[in-house]
Amino acid sequence: MLRRTFNMALTASVLALAVGVSVHAEEITAPVSAEDIAALGDVTLRVWADAGEEDMLNKLIPRYEETYPNVTVDLTIKGWDDLMGTVVNAMNSNSPPDVTNGNQGFAIMGTMVRAGLIRPLDDFIAVYGIDQGVPASGFGSMRWNEEGTAWGTGNIYGMGGATQPLGLFYNKAKLDELGIEPPQSIDALKSALASAEEAGDLPIMLGNSEQYPLGSHVLGILIDMYSNVDEINAWIAGDDGATFDTPGIRKALETLQKWGEDGYFGNGYNGRSLDDAVSAFGDGEGVFFLGGSFIGAKLSAIDPDGFGYQLLKGENGEYVTTGTFGTPWHISSKTKAEPAALAFLGMMLSDEFAQAYADVGRLPNADLAGVTPIGSMHEQQLQAAQRLFSDGAFVGYLDWASPTMQRTLGTQAQMLLAGRTDVDSFIEAVQSDWEEYQAERKDQ
Amino acid sequence: MSQMPATRGKARERRISASAAPEKDRLVARHFLYLAPGFVIYALFTLWPIIQTVHFSFLRWDGITAPRWVGMKNYIRILTDPEILIIFGHGLAMIIFYAILPVMIGLMIVAIMTRVRIRLLAVFRTVLFLPQILATVVVAVAWRWIYAYDGPINAFLGAIGLENLQRAWLGDFDTALVSVGLIGTWINFGLCMVLFIGGAQKIDRHLYEAARLDGAGPFAEFRAVTWPGLRGEVAIALVLTVTNALRNFDIVWNTTSGGPGISTLVPSYLIYENAFITRHVGRAAAASVVLTILILVLTTAIMRILRKRD
């Protein structure tokens, strides 16, 4: 009885949802005009965003509200974990945000696509020319099949504003002291780390108290160095027969293990938060920092010219790294202010607004080559991103592979460095997480 | 009952029986009416969610799209997955730090106070109670600093020549669980102490005098007078702190996120991750049900044991 009531309620809400979707599924054929938006009357555009977007939004919102005076933007800023824990339920509610940040992968974007909570953006991207000047492969993680069970092909459901390649940050003064050139390849990095260690410096600054970024970013960069890009992407996407047990991944894990044994990460990194590590690196502790370009904005704020940024060449001699178009933006399929929402993203992702991203130390997808950097490190980051856009391929983040992968990788990486697991068991644990999820996914 | 009354006594009896029954019924109905607002709120916000949780625990559900009935699968997973069993084990280990240690410390303080008159008792009591009312985020941030690699504990160890013991206390596989647990001890002993001081003040002073006249030392006095007088308070303190221990989430969340490895993962954290991050609502609900049963069993046992010899 209870179950029936519950199922009826559920059916009703699914039906309501389907109706909601069909009402707003109109495609646009031209950019939203000022008249379209004026016709909405006085409206509020509710926006949920990750804290990393705050500086950018502080520039965007006044500009937007000036252009469309009848729209008031109601902004909610959330920390990453908070956003990830609440966004899907919020989008599923009766009063969802009109525009929101989400995340790639099955747990967030996949669920929202499956439930029809977000609007396909293919028409918007074509009409606003968002796909001009950016590599088509970058949209891979934004494309989903209609069931929301597989990504890589299908409609585009999200788009980010600034690319976030993982890379190598270095302290320029320390490299000068050590008399070494910024490493361009994994082999050069290895010998640079050895020199730093010999000279008594901390080779790599790491803050991993949240089980992140050791198992995701640091290991991700190493896997990129030794692997076939397509193989890794196939594994992340959950393709049949893909495996984590490849010679490249083995080599990456062995390297990580050796770095741990050699003390390259120093002491107490599992008790230090990522934020504290970035601050400490900014204060001159540590020679290198492996992480996402988003860390660059924080370092630029400390000293725009004191640090350098470099992509690394893998074993095959090509620059390769994990990266995307950044944290995706979505439009609710239930929004009652769709023109205003489209115009909001249209302005945010436009060439005209790109400089505003650059001014807060970020790497806009739009007009990447045209923006003026805020310092020498930012310039290096922009160049690296351009290189990646022109001839690199995007490797996905490993934790997209399954909803539990972030935890599995984070746990296993800590255990590997503490000598509590070995490479074989590491691979086995990760692959079994992956296989369990693939079975679950097929069964959806 | 339409017969005429035969005697006065019978008449009175009849009056009572004729009027009392409906009067009683009316009263009962009205009683329930008074209970209704409270019950509606309780049912809506407590009973219904519990029923829903039990229902969810038999589903495979991402919280959004259509769920599917999976029977006992979620429960079987909890009882057979070694990692989940370890996580529940951590929850039980937390009882030592959140309940047993604080109660022991609280009892010790009270035992001392019954022998020694402490000046500025109110100040002393307030200061020791303070951790209980601080926001746990503040507590966690403070302890993160205390436990940090360059924090005061390691500085002290360095100063006395024990550099080889220095470590990131919350980031070390061997010490993380104990370190997190001791934060709980620090938070909870103030509560126990205040409960016990209140209880001890109710104990008749003459009992202490009698005990001392009989030549009881501090231990005998505690065993014969203080402990029996505090049984009820100890039971309440244990029920509160054991519940606290098993649903511990915020301290772990703000200090270790369950790491390193899974060494500080606790059931509440598992529930949160399943419900909101990996979107396995059915598994989260099943774990909640198991945790609730565990708390009920333990608290019932505590009440039973401590009430027995009254």
Image (cartoon, rainbow, N blue to C red):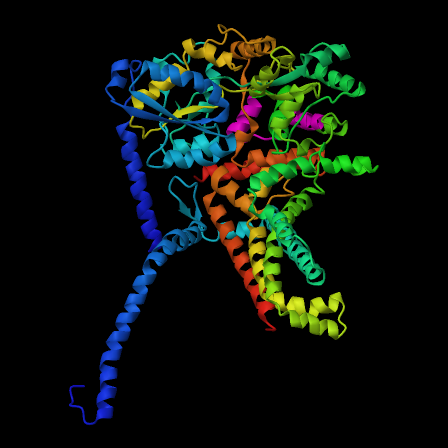
Magenta-span inclusion, residue A237 = yes
User: Which of the pair B223/B272 is nearer the observer?
Assistant: B223
Q: Which residue is farthest bottom?
A: B7
Q: Which residue is farthest right?
A: B161
Quadrant where the N terminus of chain A lies?
Answer: bottom left
Provide the major secondary structure of the magenta segment: helix
In the figure, A289 relative to B76: above or below?
A: above
Q: Position of residue A191 (x, y in %)?
A: 75, 16
Q: Tag count in the figure? A: 0
Quadrant where the C terminus of chain A lies?
Answer: top left
What residue appears at the point 71 percent right and 9 percent down from the top-left corner? A181
Range of residues picked out in magenta: A230-256
In the figure, B146 relative to B111: above or below?
A: above
Magenta-span inclusion, residue A225 = no
Q: Where is residue B56 in the image (x, y as percent from the top left)?
A: 43, 49
- In the rendered structure, the answer to whether residue A11 lies left or right of residue A100 reads left
Q: Where is residue A119 in the image (x, y as percent from the top left)?
A: 35, 26
What residue appears at the point 71 percent right and 43 percent down from the top-left corner? B175
User: Which of the pair B86/A95 is nearer the observer?
Assistant: A95
Q: Which residue is farthest front?
A: B119
User: Which of the pair B262/A308 is nearer the observer?
Assistant: A308
- In the rendered structure, the answer to whether residue A67 lies left or right of residue B7 reads right
User: Which of the pair B116/B58 is nearer the observer?
Assistant: B116
